[in-house]
Amino acid sequence: MENITLQVEGMSCQHCVNSIEGALKEIGVSGKVNLQHHTVDVSFDKNKANLEKIKEIIEEQGYDVV
């Protein structure tokens, strides 16, 4: 498993948490949003997902990965 922390801008509430974590779960990625630090900790199998796809999924939800 690969673990990485992404800086994500635009998150401010529980809806943001649910949106991001839910979308990542749909592609088999475990995501944990930290609103206070504006981060998302992700854990994924490199054979099933890649970092570019994870960033794309988060950005499709309306947030900016920096």
Image (cartoon, rainbow, N blue to C red):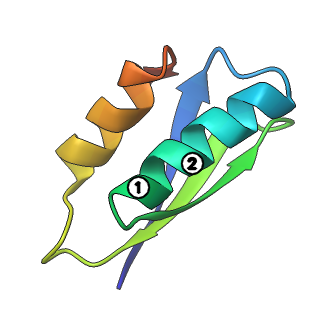
Q: Quadrant of residue 15?
A: top right
Circle 2 sits in a helix, a strand or a loop, which is it?
Answer: helix
In this view, the residue in front, 59 or 25, is 25
Instruction: Please name the residue shown 70% across and 47% down the image.
Output: 33
Amino acid type, label 2: Gly
Q: Is residue 38 visible?
A: no
Q: Quadrant of residue 2?
A: bottom left
- Could you tell me which quadrant the C terminus lies in? top left
* Residue 35 placement, left or right of 19: right
List the residue tagged with mark 2.
22
Which residue appears farthest toward the front when viewing the image?
26
Residue 30 appears left or right of 56: right
Residues packed near mark 2 inside 10 Å, few (<14), some (14 to 19) or many (20 plus): some
Q: Which mark is residue 26?
A: 1
Q: CA distance from mark 1 to mark 2?
A: 6 Å
Q: Is residue 30 above or below residue 59?
A: below
Check whether the beta carbons of the residues at disc 1 and disc 2 lie within 8 A of each other.
yes
